[in-house]
Amino acid sequence: MFIDSDHPLLVHGSSDMGFNPYEIRRDFPILEREVNGRRLVYLDNAATTQKPRQVIEAIREYYEKYNANVHRGFHTLSQEASEAYEKAHETIAKFINAYSWEEIVFTFNSTEALNLIAYAWGFKNLREGDEIILTVMEHHSNMLPWRNIARLKNAKIKYVDITDDGLLRYDQLEEMVSEKTRIIAVTMMSNVLGTVNDIKRIAKIAHSVDAIIVVDGAQGVPHLPVNVRDLDIDFLAFSGHKMLGPTGIGVLWGKRDRLDEMMPFKVGGDTIKDVTLDDVVWQDLPWRFEAGTPNIAGGIGLAVAAEYLMRLGMDNVRQHEIELTSYTLKRIREELSSDVEYYGPWDARIKGGVIAFNIRDLHHHTVGKALDMLGIAVRTGKHCAHPLHYRLGINGTVRASYYIYNTREEVDALVEALKTIIGLKETLKTTEEPDVCPGG
Ligand SMILES: Cc1ncc(COP(=O)(O)O)c(C=O)c1O
């Protein structure tokens, strides 16, 4: 599908990039690695991204110079650690243009953030008969928490379908909402189709019936300029490790009023101002939702990752991925279409840098293993989006996904490797291999 230049989903980036992927690569030591005798081509960024020296160094510096617990001590190390950890919340607030750093809750990852919203907001606010609207393109992390809370509260789940082009059925969503709708939970970008959803439009639909909108930003936030005020959403979840940060740190952003409507869910140390045997006074935001000793090094590392991305400019990040994706789709369409089945929108301007496909008559795992033999890392399987694969009538896909350090030459390497694999199809054909559900 091709679209008009005033299409609401279009993200315009500068073509004059103050941004050079070849220079950026120098900050990523792992990209020097060889795999199976070839220079690594890392195309599994939707699962996790590589880390620049700056992030690795910030974590090392914390452990070497000011490792201490936060919020607890008057000693110098504890004050330095607390200051850096709190400042990390401010940096993340700036990254997504939150109203205040107090709306930033650090979690373990997107999955934990989404569970937290489902249980903490959902448990307090859902009633029997209420409806939660999800989409068939959701990752399990933005599907299963809602199904669990719906079961606990006797609420109902409804799913919005996709078009044949892999776009969300906005017409169906508009018909589906009613005064019973309490929550619309939707991904900003599909981790399989790459589809970028029109979050502003969905927020308006949600608010027209006084429902809240929860956005799974695990794929969107690392790749698109995100401004929560402009989007006018209620909650956003994302993961540090998918945006150059370390694993074990994620973010839950919520509008202050919404966070105030949540009951403290995980409770214990750091969540309280005072406790007696019969009563408890909860801490201010965001601490009442960050129970126990947090991932201090992770928070500090994530802030450095966000600063790195802000220096590059998220418009430039987006533009770079549009260019790589559009080049890949052109080569697939022109050179591989008789052997390759591609899933998702064909217009790179309305999708992220995620290319899901199959080679006809070859199992996706076989293709993934063959690409690895050629030094190219991709993901294969159902990418924790089983219902979407069943909706597409397939058992899995090969997924190549891009980030700031990927180059046109790496796209060429992928396309040439696919040609080699297609040439060896008869030799490579195997019986069905077992499916696994790796992350991402
Ligand atoms: C769209 C989407 N949502 C949620 C997640 C879960 O992220 P995490 O495993 O970091 O919690 C992923 C991970 O790949 C994802 O792609």
Image (cartoon, helix red, strand yellow):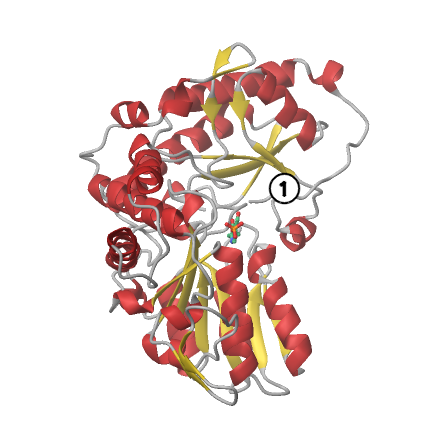
Q: Residue furthest bottom?
A: 278
Q: Can residue 175 be spotted in the picture?
A: no
What secondary structure is found at the residue carrying circle 1? loop
Visible residue check, residue 375: yes
Q: Nearer the viewer, residue 240 or 315?
A: 240
Residue drawn at x 63%, y 20% as measured from the top left: 370
Q: Is 299 on the left-hand or right-hand side of 33?
A: left
User: In this view of the protein, which residue sits in the foreground, 137 or 337?
Assistant: 137
Identity, as a three-letter code, of the amino acid under mark 1: Pro
- Horizontal side of residue 282 vs 19, given as left or right: right
* On screen, residue 262 above or below 348: below
Neighbour tally class for label 1: few under 14, some 14-19, many 20 plus, Cα within 10 Å: few
Q: Position of residue 306 (x, y in %)?
A: 29, 47
Give the quadrant of residue 22: top left
| Residue at the front extreme, as displayed | 75
According to the picture, the residue beneath numbered tag 1 turns out to be: 438
x 43%, y 51%: residue = 249
Count of all numbered marks drawn on residues in the image: 1
Q: Position of residue 172 (x, y in %)?
A: 54, 69
Query: Quadrant location of residue 78?
Result: bottom left
On-image quarter of the C terminus = top right
Residue situated in front as seen by the camera: 161 or 82: 82
**Residue under the point 38% across and 28% down:** 406
Image location (x, y in percent) of residue 131: 58, 79
